[in-house]
Image (spheres, rainbow, N blue to C red):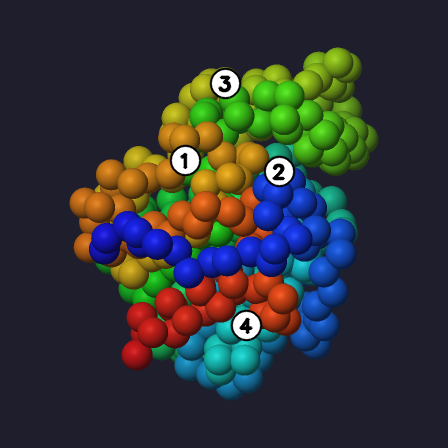
Amino acid sequence: MPVVETSSYRPPWWLKNAHAQTVWPALVRKVTAPVWQRERLELTDGDFLDLDWVRAGSPRLVVLTHGLEGNSRRTYMVGMAQAFHRRGWDVLAWNFRGCSGEPNRLCRSYHSGATEDLAAVIAHATRTGAYDRVAVVGFSLGANLTLKFLGELGAAPGLVCGGAGISVPCDLQAAAQQMAGPACASYMRRFLHDMGDKMRAKARQFPDRIDLAPLEGMTTFQEFDDAYTAPLHGFRDAEDYWTRCSARQFLPQIRVPTLIVSALDDPFLAPECFPYAEAKASPWVTLDAPARGGHVGFASLAAEYWSERRAAEFLTGAVR
């Protein structure tokens, strides 16, 4: 698919700043939540995932994957769920391990490349035979995971008919370096605060396995991933984790219609996170990179944000 030369996104005149676009939807936007039905999925490794459903009896299911320290009830997840629900899809919004309000059981967490959990969610959702088509949509960290998952499926996608990634840090090392810069200091402090709290809770579960000393004075994702993400999930260090889990290398293997939406002014994304060459070379991947939009922003004066309409219309068209 060609790269979209001129994106259709136009921000409100009063919301053109990248940081305002990033913060406004999270703090100000109000979306009426659907009536979720929660289900707990027991995993074969002894852990669990909490799933939130909106069912309409459709043969089409969209699976939504949230971002770093998010959950299924975040505004961007609810907005996307409503967009697909309006178009007749069933919706499953899942929570990463430890993100549903209850600590997970094992001495591990979630990370950008943990596609085995998304695979388990889809296998569970389709086990009854109720769905003949499944689409996947991810945000930020969850978008990297989603695109990596689609690339791993390759030419054997099964029921998976398409996907979309919103604000994708598809080069994890470049994104981590971008986030370490002064322009992202406030975001980094908040992420590390929340992630640090998760590690403190995990240390109470596993006092002999979690060392909290590295949290003191920690200021970057590299420090956190070196100290916790890598050793807890079988990686040598942060660089090994980033190298093995960055979605950009998996894009050439994707064989279902896939949309990537990332704003050029996204404060979280480095230039390496915009896969122009891969999109131009692939008949399956479309890159839509508006000049503005911030990180998981794309605010609109309408109730349905542009990114929600873009993803829902793209995938609804793909399954016809």
Work out how far the residue at label 4 is from the one at label 1, CA to CA, in angstroms: 26 Å
Q: Residue at x 34, y 50 (%)?
A: 287
Q: Mark 1 or mark 2: which is in front?
A: 1
Q: Residue 112, can we see it?
A: no
Q: Residue at x 24, y 39 (%)?
A: 277
Residue nearest the viewer, comparing 317 with 218: 317
Q: According to the image, label 1 marks what residue? A: 273
Rendering coords of residue 24 (x, y %): 70, 51
The residue wearing badge 4 is 83
Mark 4 touches mark 3? (CB < 8 Å) = no
Under mark 4, the amino acid is Ala
Sequence order check, earlier mark of 1 and 3: 3
Residue ID for mark 2: 109
Q: Position of residue 317 (x, y in %)?
A: 34, 74
- SS at mark 1? helix
Q: Residue furthest front?
A: 13
Give the quadrant of the N terminus.
Answer: bottom left
Q: Residues within 10 Å of mark 2 (few under 14, many from 20)?
A: many
Where residue 116 appears, x then y in whole percent?
A: 45, 47
Q: Earlier in the sequence, mark 1 or mark 2?
A: 2
Alpha carbon separation for disc pair 1 and 2: 24 Å
Report the mark closest to the observer, 2 or 4. Answer: 4
Q: Say which of 218 and 317 sits in front.
A: 317
Residue located at (54% from left, 49% from top): 293
The first of marks 2 and 4 along the sequence is 4
Against 206, residue 310 (above or below) is below
What residue does disc 3 label? Answer: 237
Residue 192 against residue 45 in the figure, above or below: above
Label 2 or label 3, whichever comes before in sequence order: 2
Q: Is residue 175 visible?
A: yes
Q: Mark 2 touching mark 3, by CB under 8 A?
A: no
The location of residue 227, given as percent across then percent down, is 62, 19
